[in-house]
Amino acid sequence: MSDEQQPDVRWAPIPPKPSNAKRVWLIVGLVVAALAIVGVLLFFLLPRGGAPDPGASGTPTPSSSPTASPTPTSTPIPEPSITPIDTPPPVVDPSIEAFRGQVGGWLGDAGRGLDIVAGSAGQDAIPVIDTLQEDAQRLSEAQPPSSIATQWSDGVADYMRKLSTLRSAVNGGTGISAAIDSARGAVQSLTALVGL
């Protein structure tokens, strides 16, 4: 009987070793993460390829200083004289047709706006006058042809003064119709000047 029990113990299956696959994958994952972190740090901390800009660093490198300055004793090279441009390039004088197209909308709105002011009661006209004054400012900023530049700037200034008078008349409640007629006359002078 003892002979029969010995082979059973000798030939019994060996219990399997615990699996190390999880540990191996954990180590591999940590190594990959460490390499990725090192790669990102190197990417951001090391200078990139290419020559640095001349003004990028405050200290010049020793190799760049001898080559940057030529020897003045051998053959002086005259530097090209570059004169800075203080004046802007000349503005192209617009044609009267182009200028008419630029300001025609604002002048048309001025006539309609004055009609609205004439039909409004009291303080309801103030927002319309504000819009007319903004359009008058745009008219003053428009570049007229040189042939009518003086008449245009004088006419727009007159129109702006008459709009201020109209605003005061609406706020005071008196002389509104006379102020509207005066502003309308200024608009008609401007439209006639540009040929509308």
Image (cartoon, rainbow, N blue to C red):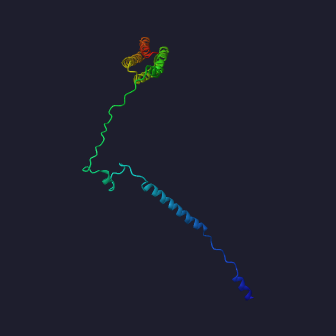
Residue 94 x %, y %: 42, 23
Most distant residue in the front direction: 75
Q: Nearer the viewer, residue 70 or 140?
A: 70
Quadrant position of residue 191: top left
Question: Image height check: is 17 above or below 125?
Answer: below
Q: Quadrant of the N terminus?
A: bottom right
Residue at the location (45% across, 54% down)? 44
Q: Nearer the viewer, residue 56 or 11?
A: 56
Residue at the location (49% across, 59% down)? 37
Quadrant position of residue 165: top left
In the image, taking residue 136 as reference, residue 26 lies left or right, namely right
Most distant residue in the left direction: 73
In the image, taking residue 27 as reference, residue 92 lies left or right, namely left
Residue 40 x %, y %: 48, 56
Q: How many marks?
A: 0
Most distant residue in the bottom direction: 2
Residue 67 x %, y %: 32, 53
Q: Nearer the viewer, residue 123 or 42?
A: 42
Question: Image height check: is 85 above or below 166?
Answer: below
Q: Nearer the viewer, residue 81 or 165?
A: 81
Quadrant position of residue 126: top left
Residue 123 x %, y %: 46, 19
